[in-house]
Each structure stands twice: as structure tokens, then as C-alpha cells.
């Protein structure tokens, strides 16, 4: 039986000084950035980014997402889970491959693991709840851009492996939507320009 989750209220103040150009720039300038270094976002900046993430479309106010923030040594602990997953997936994996897996979470000073969590609801199907969690991840990346940081939304089979799921404390209704890496864009790194093709749009009048 569906039961609504405890309501979490986030009040965002509006202002006449809001600059629509700046807001749109944060969206259009967002890029997946693989080269991220220290410093990462501060705790207060992360809290603000997560508040923005939680403003994603949320039919039924289910809040079908959860976040696990990894800083410091917790990244190495995730790396150890990655290494276990690699070794269990391929018992013949070389030491080099296992060590490489362990180092993956060290590619940025902060990782926010975005989890999608679905509940049974008469009007909101599971796929819609998962899309909402994806929107929350996108909001997080846009918020990072607005704060002057780079982001990289990473996915892959690690998030589905029991060793990683257990390490992150996922329940059966949860799945990893993405590992969002956050940090300062490495000096000299310039992501390639992104061309927008509106051929995907169908106009009807």
C-alpha cells in the first residue's frame, strides 16, 4: 500500500534581482568535466547545491531520491568496494585492473551518489520516479556550475554490483542514478564546445 513519505519543505525566496541570463548560463555552460581537482565545494556550498537538486519535478511529492555525499577517506572506501566488485566480477582480473578500479573515486575531491528510490503509487509509475531522480542529478550539476565548480555525472555497472550497493547501504527499492563527481576544473582544461541541434524538435500549430 502506498504511503506518502514525510513531507520535506524547502522554501526558496524569490527576488526581483534574479538575472534570467545568469540562470540560463548555468544551464547552457554545464559540461561533463573529467579533470577535477581540489578544492571541492565547501559544506555550505554542497548544502545549497543539494537544496537545488531537491527542487526537481516531483509528481506526488514523493521525493524519490536520496544522496550520499563522499568526501575525504570515504572516497577510498568506495574505491575498495569498486575493487571488490571488480575482483568478484572477474576472478582473473589483473592487479592493475583492480587497483585502477580502487582509484576511480579519487578523480574528484567530492562525490555525490544520487540514488533513485521508488515507492508504490497509484498515479506515479516507477519510471516517472526514476526520471525525477535524474532531474535531481541534473539540477545538482547545474548548481555546481553556478557555484563555479565542474561536475561529471558517471554511471556504470559498479552501481549495480552487490558489493557497492551494500557499501552504500541501498535497499531493494533504490538504484544508483549516478556518481556525480564535483571539484575545481583543472587549469588549462577546456571542454569541447557543444553544438545544439534542434532537429529533434517537431513543431505543430
Image (spheres, rainbow, N blue to C red):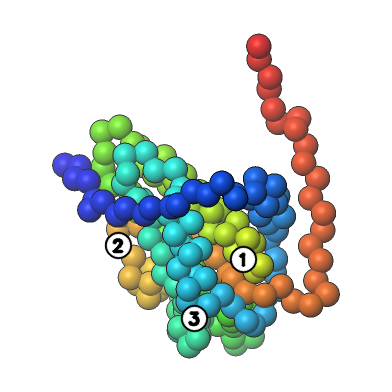
x and y percentages locating residue 122 in the rendered image:
26, 33
Q: Sequence-wise, which precedes: disc 3 or disc 2?
A: 3
x and y percentages locating residue 199 in the rendered image:
76, 30
Q: What label sits on residue 171 in the rendered view? A: 2
Tag 3 secondary structure: strand
Q: Nearer the viewer, mark 3 or mark 2?
A: 3
Mark 2 burial class by Cα count in 10 Å: few <14, some 14-19, many 20+: few
The residue that label 3 is drawn on is 71
Q: Residue furthest top?
A: 205
Q: What label sits on residue 25 in the rendered view? A: none
Q: Sequence-wise, which precedes: disc 1 or disc 2?
A: 1
Which is nearer the eye, 183 or 181? 183
x and y percentages locating residue 84 in the rendered image:
46, 80
Q: Residue at x 52, y 71 (%)?
A: 45
Which is nearer the eye, 29 or 156? 29
x and y percentages locating residue 42 in the rendered image:
53, 77
Q: Residue at x 79, y 62 (%)?
A: 191
Which is nearer the eye, 153 or 41? 41
Q: Quadrant of the C terminus?
A: top right
Q: Is residue 4 left or right of residue 56?
A: left
The residue that label 1 is drawn on is 147
Q: CA distance from mark 3 to mark 1?
A: 18 Å
Mark 3 burial class by Cα count in 10 Å: few <14, some 14-19, many 20+: some
Q: Residue furthest left?
A: 1
Q: Is residue 151 visible?
A: no
Q: CA distance from mark 1 to mark 2?
A: 32 Å
Q: Is residue 125 left or right of residue 102?
A: left
Tag 2 secondary structure: loop
Amino acid at each position: 500500500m502506498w504511503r506518502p513519505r514525510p513531507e520535506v519543505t524547502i522554501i526558496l525566496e524569490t527576488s526581483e534581482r534574479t538575472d534570467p541570463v545568469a540562470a540560463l548560463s548555468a544551464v547552457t555552460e554545464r559540461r561533463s568535466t573529467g579533470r577535477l581537482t581540489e578544492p571541492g565545494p565547501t559544506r555550505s556550498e554542497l548544502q545549497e547545491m543539494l537544496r537545488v537538486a531537491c527542487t526537481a519535478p516531483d509528481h506526488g511529492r514523493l521525493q524519490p531520491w536520496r544522496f550520499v555525499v563522499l568526501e575525504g577517506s570515504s572516497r577510498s572506501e568506495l574505491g575498495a568496494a569498486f575493487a571488490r566488485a571488480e575482483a568478484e566480477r572477474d576472478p582473473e582480473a589483473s592487479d592493475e585492473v583492480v587497483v585502477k578500479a580502487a582509484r576511480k573515486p579519487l578523480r574528484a575531491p567530492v562525490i555525490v551518489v544520487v540514488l533513485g528510490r521508488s515507492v508504490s503509487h497509484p498515479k506515479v509509475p516507477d519510471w516517472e520516479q526514476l526520471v525525477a531522480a535524474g532531474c535531481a542529478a541534473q539540477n545538482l550539476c547545474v548548481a555546481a556550475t553556478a557555484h563555479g565548480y565542474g561536475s561529471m555525472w558517471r554511471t556504470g555497472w559498479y552501481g549495480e554490483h552487490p558489493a557497492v550497493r551494500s557499501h552504500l547501504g541501498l535497499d531493494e527499492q533504490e538504484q544508483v542514478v549516478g556518481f556525480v563527481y564535483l571539484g575545481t576544473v583543472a587549469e588549462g582544461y577546456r571542454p569541447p564546445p557543444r553544438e545544439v541541434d534542434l532537429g529533434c524538435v517537431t513543431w505543430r500549430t
